[in-house]
Image: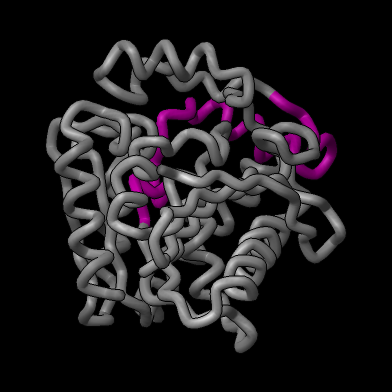
């Protein structure tokens, strides 16, 4: 039986962020803290929950500001530092009530860039992590039209809250039509971006790529070879620049962006679990 909890976590600036967690009946062996991608939320990882809970992992998920059940204009941030502070508050909350339990940080899509930025920034007060997982991370070109990116960059200073649809085809999420239908029917999902997010994303991406060699934590990267949402080439380039020896790249050639929901997800989650087991 899986026990589910939900509640609010106060970020550094006082914003109350929605979170939920799933726990096994038995003693927890390790914790996976999930940071979702653009337009997603904490409730979109049920396959991961169903796979890891029976193996006595606990899963925590947060709705970043402007997403899911958390407050804020959809996809808007004043600066990337807000995401960084949100993740920091999330991890401190988890660590405070799970002392001594192995903790892994997992970022999907835009969340992959968010967690890499968080880990790479120097801060001595961070909770200890057993490892970092980047799941189809946004580390290069994306399915967003270059014209829309240029519009965002132009408007960021004069109209930062300008919002428009990203234009990414929902059918690029997965090959399974049932998954696409669930995405469309999910009222908590959104498909927009903002001008300020566009420029903050670009500058953060450049910074993270430039500091790849400073990553010094056990690292697992999982890529979808047929990903047209976050193209894998940028992630491969990032991975090659990492000098830390405990790094692993898993790529699934035919898979689409939502690796955890697409056909063959069982293999993906088995590989994820095996890596977690080796790093507990």
For image coordinates 61% across by 20% down, the residue present is 165
Q: Quadrant of residue 129?
A: bottom left
Q: Please name whichever residue, 143 or 110, is drawn nearer the observer in this view of the structure.
A: 110
Rendered location of residue 232, percent (x, y)? 28, 44
Q: Nearer the viewer, residue 255 or 274?
A: 274
User: What residue appears at the point 24 percent right and 57 percent down from the top-left corner?
Assistant: 273
Q: Position of residue 200 (x, y in %)?
A: 64, 51
Quadrant of the image for the C terminus?
A: bottom left
Residue 83 in the image, given as x and y percentages of width and height: 66, 56
* Residue 148 seen from this side: yes
User: What's the residue at 54%, 34% (across, down)?
Assistant: 40
Residue at point 45% right, 76% down?
101
Specify whether residue 145 is painted magenta. yes
Whether residue 90 appears in magenta in the rendering, the answer is: no
Q: Nearer the viewer, residue 245 or 264?
A: 264
| Residue 60, above or below 37 | below
Q: Is residue 190 above or below residue 251?
A: above
Quadrant of res 241: bottom left
* Residue nearest the observer in this picture, 259 or 53: 53
| Magenta residues (range) | 134-163
Is residue 112 visible to us here?
Answer: no
């Amino acid at each position: 039986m899986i026990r589910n909890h939900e509640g609010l976590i106060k970020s550094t600036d006082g914003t109350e962020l929605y979170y939920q967690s799933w726990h096994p009946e038995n003693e927890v062996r390790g914790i996976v803290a999930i940071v979702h991608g653009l337009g997603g939320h904490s409730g979109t990882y049920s396959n991961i929950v169903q796979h890891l809970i029976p193996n006595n992992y606990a899963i925590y998920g947060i709705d970043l500001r402007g997403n899911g059940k958390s407050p804020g204009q959809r996809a808007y941030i004043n600066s990337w530092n807000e995401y960084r502070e949100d993740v920091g508050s999330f991890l401190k909350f988890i660590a405070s009530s799970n002392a001594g339990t192995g903790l892994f940080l997992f970022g999907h899509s835009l969340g992959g860039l968010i967690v890499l930025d968080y880990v790479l920034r120097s801060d001595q007060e961070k909770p200890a992590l057993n490892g970092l997982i980047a799941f189809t991370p946004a580390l290069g070109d994306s399915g967003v039209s270059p014209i829309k990116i240029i519009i965002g960059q132009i408007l960021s200073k004069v109209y930062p809250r300008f919002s428009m649809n990203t234009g990414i085809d929902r059918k690029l999420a997965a090959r399974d039509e049932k998954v696409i239908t669930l995405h469309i029917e999910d009222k908590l999902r959104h498909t927009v971006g903002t001008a300020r997010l566009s420029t903050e994303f670009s500058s953060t991406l450049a910074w993270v790529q430039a500091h790849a060699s400073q990553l010094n934590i056990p690292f697992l990267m999982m890529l979808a070879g047929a990903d047209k949402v976050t193209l894998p080439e940028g992630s491969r380039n990032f991975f090659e620049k990492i000098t830390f020896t405990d790094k692993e790249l898993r790529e699934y050639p035919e898979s689409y962006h939502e690796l955890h929901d697409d056909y063959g997800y069982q293999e993906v989650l088995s590989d994820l679990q095996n890596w977690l087991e080796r790093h507990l």
